[in-house]
Image (tube, rainbow, N blue to C red):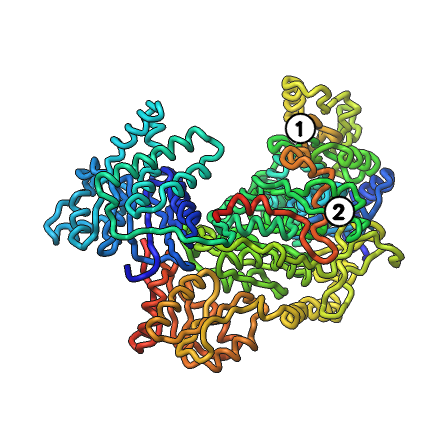
Amino acid sequence: MKRNDFSWMIGGVQGSGVDTSANIFARAAAAGGLSVYGKREYYSNIKGEHSYFQVRVSRTLVRSHVDTVDMLATFEEETIFRHALEVRSDGAIVYNPDQDGTRLADIPTIESPVRVRLNEALTKSGLSADVKGVLELARRGGVHVYAVPYDQLLKKVGDEFGETSLSALQRMLNVMAVAASFALLSYDEELVKNALRKQFRSKPKVAEMNAGAVGVAYGFIREKYNGGFGFKLEPVKTDEVRLFVRGQSTVAMAKELAGCRLQTYYPITPASDESEYLEAHGVIELDGPTAQENPQVAEAATMKQKGSIAVVQSEDEIAAVTMAIGGGIAGVRSSTSTSGPGFSLMAEGLGYAGINEVPVVVTLYSRGGPSTGLPTRHEQGDLRFALHAGHGEFPRLILASGDLDEAFYDTVRAFNYAERYQTPVIHIVDKALANSDATMPKFDVGKVKIDRGLFLRGPLKGIENGEFRRYQQAAGGISPRPPVGTKGAVYWLTGDEHNELGHITEDPTIRDAMMEKRMGKIDTADSEIPMSERVNFFGPEDADITIVSWGSTKGAILDAMEWLKEDGIKVSFLQIRLINPFPTQYAGDVLSKSKKVVGVEMNYSAQLIGILRERTCIPVDQLVVKYNGRPMSCEEVYNAVKLIAQGKAPKRVVLKAGA
Amino acid sequence: MHNDWCPGCGDFGILNAVQMALAEMNVDPSSTVVVSGVGCSSKAPHFIKTYGVHTLHGRTLPFATGIKLANPNLEVVAEGGDGDGMGIGAGHFVNSGRRNVDMLYIVHDNEVYGLTKGQAAPTMKLGMKTKSLPLPNINQGINPIMLALASGYTFIARGYSYDVRHLKDLIIKGIRHKGFAFLDVLQPCPTYNDIQTKEYWAGEGNLDANGHQQPRTYKLEETGYDGVVHGGAADEVQEKFQQAVLKSFEFGDHTPIGVIYQNEFIPTYEERLVGRAPTYLSNPPASQEISKPDGTPLANIDKLLEELRVT
């Protein structure tokens, strides 16, 4: 094995437990101290279409997926047809020998382009268009094929545990495939069994039977293949407390920590899982302040109670965003989560929050567009739209997280910015992050601070005429903000231009003052937010190539940089995290000193690079873009940058990998 | 802010009734929020001295819902036109019935879009031609009462903007109702609707057998009609629902005003949220402290993190 990591793939019919098997594989590997990165690909379909999960494990940190498959675990034929030829030479395939005779023509869910390509390859090699033929083709390419008679083994498990129901046994097929994989890798059997016990902790009987299935699979591999596979996966000793997390739940947990107490949503892939997590965990445990810290609050009986988040599934995204803004008007940290099509509907709401200076957070899980686009696939195509959504001009902050760790802390920051600058904040988290799993050190909750800006708790006293000047001119454009419902005064909000009380006006002088007040808040944010929250810079300052990118390409770029370093190519990487206000000065300084600037983005038109040029007037030398819906792999970035370094790449490199 | 409605506008009657109702109930202005959409009637919050939230066209109800769910201790009154509620906001109207959040929604129903100069609104009947229309209305009119019934509203009433005292009483009933109250208010638009005028509702041309002018509205309570569900049994609910459906067809020369249907046996959305988080009402979102004075979050997510722990 050239590299220090191992890439395992499992596929199957959607709804048949592919996710669960990948989760068990990843957890078992993670429990052994290995670093894990998992990526899920699926169709916009409930049951029947093909989905697959790729898990990359390593003794050292991994942050991205690779295109290479070292081992393919299958329990049905479609996965073999689709992925067998992706397995690298000297890699392995685990399969059910009962399926040898299944013909390519028997699988209706394989699209004709895939079918035609595969048929051609098989015919050229003089092989039959069935499982046997495909596996033979893989074998000729140096792949080891391991036949595991699942049905026989499951029957053995059934005999051991007194389980006669065929369907109950069949449900363990995927576990068999996982166990056989680990057995071939000579991985610690107990770690696998424990991962299953954790997975099925609410059903101890099922857990034990599954653990039993692991034992049977290990026994079979030991006997038949004598440990078999050349690659040994060894646990690593670690004292670090690590989590195994997924995108949407990471953001959801951070929202609870950040004090978000109203979340609205309309169901949409890939955003809904976040809201569902919040629904399932709607009761919030609290750390009460001590009487010394805050006697007033500690006294209040409410502190003895638990907190909660109200989660509302709305009739559409217009309602979702306007309800969330309603929450902001009432002084509650509120947010909504959506994807591109839903975000399109939210545009009018953003403008309302903008002109009324209401804090609201929109978590935007971008996916392949336009229109319905590629509903379950990845793209970074919404950056320009997020920056400009809505008519007229109003301030907004845009944050884009590069990995799950950033997504956690950025979620809290989004709420802090929203309240501090009293305006909408769009937090872009994309499909690749939402549907990736990764091991990472436990989030440091102690690092998190809540900043509510000029939020004002009442009651208000001595207010002239009982009418509070909510939009009074103030330094930096930011006025004190008592929520609607604060005792002692009233004020108004309106989507029309308004005076300091919030009443409608068309007066040109007031209009100017209010526009300048609102738009000035972006300058205030620009001057206040530290650069450490806005950009990351990796690599040497004297690099030959400087990559500029944003969002989830971060992992693939950082992993590729390690390989490029081994090849003697010096690469640095400027990651823009706060898109608005744009870190113009910083980016300008870095890029004006760079020898060669390469923009890397998961969209057609290199949207960030356009913004970069608009703000800094610095052109970018070369582009690496991708828009086929599949996230960039580490190899793709590596290969593209290497070609650029060698002067062999076109000005615009379009990446194509992914199934 | 000065009022810029046309002289004689039905909005004045509704505004007066709202102000009288709030005064009679002795509400705290700073615990009360009037939420509106866009249109002539939606300027109303600016003329009422409570918190006023003048929102987007058609979005009255989701904004009001967000405010109320964030702070269920507030008295929330939503107001808007029939175009706002039944046209651009129709989806929100229907789905608000499903939720049954505890608030009142007053629809100013004058059958025209006033602020854009008199186009046909969703409640205008097919073939009607006001002076503002170049040709008769090409669409059928929505039956707002039946739409509210079908959507699950638990209080459905109709008022008339120039019977201010009666309307004021309906507003008070709507505010006191436990659940979502819908109040459809018949309202002349003296500038664009020259058919359903003040005189029309007063009975101009509507003569009985003796040649006496008969008002086109009548009060349900004066006929012995009782729209209120008292016991909550399924057959009673069905009976009240059915009589309300029949009343919803009466429109024009003999139009009922008053409480058409009321059922307080349906749990409010707030009560349903308590079913999910028991402290939702005793410690609602707007009352929850989220951080210590130094900014340290109060939420403790250790258990959530522990679930994800692998080493």
Q: Residue A56 or A216: which is nearer the viewer?
A: A216
User: Pointers 2 and 1 in contact (CB under 8 A)?
Assistant: no
Q: Earlier in the sequence, mark 2 or mark 1?
A: 2
Q: Position of residue A326 (x, y in %)?
A: 67, 49
Q: Residues within 10 Å of mark 2 (few under 14, many from 20)?
A: many
- Where A547 sits versus A163, above or below? below
**Distance (Cα) linking label 2 and label 1:** 24 Å
Q: Assign a secondary structure to mark 2.
A: strand
Amino acid type, label 1:
Ile
Q: Position of residue A316 (x, y in %)?
A: 55, 45
Q: Is residue A214 visible?
A: yes
Dividing the picture into quadrants, the one containing residue B256 is top right
How many marks the image carries: the answer is 2
According to the image, label 1 marks what residue?
B266
Q: Position of residue A164 (x, y in %)?
A: 33, 23
* Tag shown at residue A209: none
- Seen in the image, is B152 located left or right of residue A384? right
- Where A273 sits versus A514, above or below? above
* Tag shown at residue B34: 2
Q: Assign a secondary structure to mark 1.
A: loop
Q: Residues within 10 Å of mark 1 (few under 14, many from 20)?
A: some
> Can you say which quadrant of the picture contains the N terminus of chain A?
bottom left
Q: Position of residue A480 (x, y in %)?
A: 77, 61
- Where A605 sits versus A99, above or below? below
Q: Residue at 39%, 76% (x, y): give it.
A: A570
> What chain does badge 2 belong to?
B
Q: Residue A29 or B165: which is nearer the viewer?
A: A29
Q: Residue at 86%, 42% (x, y): give it.
A: B23
Q: Residue at 74%, 22% (x, y): give it.
A: B226
